[in-house]
Image (cartoon, rainbow, N blue to C red):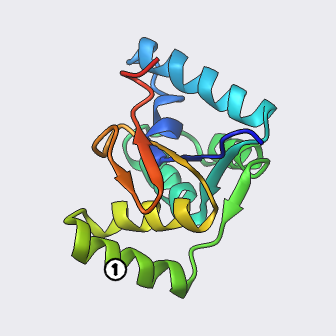
Amino acid sequence: MATRSFIDTNILVYAEASDEPAKQQIALALLKQLYETATGVLSTQVLQEYCNVALKKLKLPAGYIRAQLDLYEQFEIVQVTPAIIRAGLDLHQTRSVSFYDALIMASAEMAGCSVLLSEDMNSGEVISSVRVQNPFVEN
């Protein structure tokens, strides 16, 4: 079975980042590969964060963001539940990571992912059987 990978918000943001062409290429190729192999996982939190950044920072039109959401809904989507929030709170307390990063980690673990693709966390660190990997430095 192929490795299931949880996709952090920054991957989706870099897929839009024409001002960062190298990272944009990596993000787009990664999303394509994860889609084609059906091994990519997102959460409702990641989709919310993407929409917020796309609207506020990237100033993308709502219609475009809706179209992107239609694409991203083709991935497996983890619903952030009270159980995931509790697990995130525990990780926040025991691992000294931000609460929102802890929610991402908890979502990845609950989805059975062995890899968390993120630029924002410590690459190589293993948290609750999920290994953090920064795709922008580990190609």
Q: Quadrant of residue 110?
A: bottom right
Which residue is label 1 attached to? Answer: 89
Up-down relation of residue 71 to residue 96 (above or below): above
Q: Residue at x 80, y 31 (%)?
A: 36
Q: Quadrant of residue 92?
A: bottom left
Q: Residue furthest left?
A: 96
Q: Residue at x 45, y 25 (%)?
A: 17
Q: Is residue 32 left or right of residue 15?
A: right
Q: Residue at x 24, y 66 (%)?
A: 95
Up-down relation of residue 23 to residue 79 (above or below): above
State the image coordinates of residue 50 (x, y, percent, origin top left): 50, 50
Residue type, mark 1 in image: Leu
State the image coordinates of residue 82 (x, y, percent, origin top left): 52, 87
Q: Nearer the viewer, residue 116 or 29?
A: 116
Q: Residue at x 65, y 51 (%)?
A: 41
Q: Element at badge 1?
A: helix
Up-down relation of residue 73 to residue 79 (above or below): above
State the image coordinates of residue 128 (x, y, percent, origin top left): 43, 63
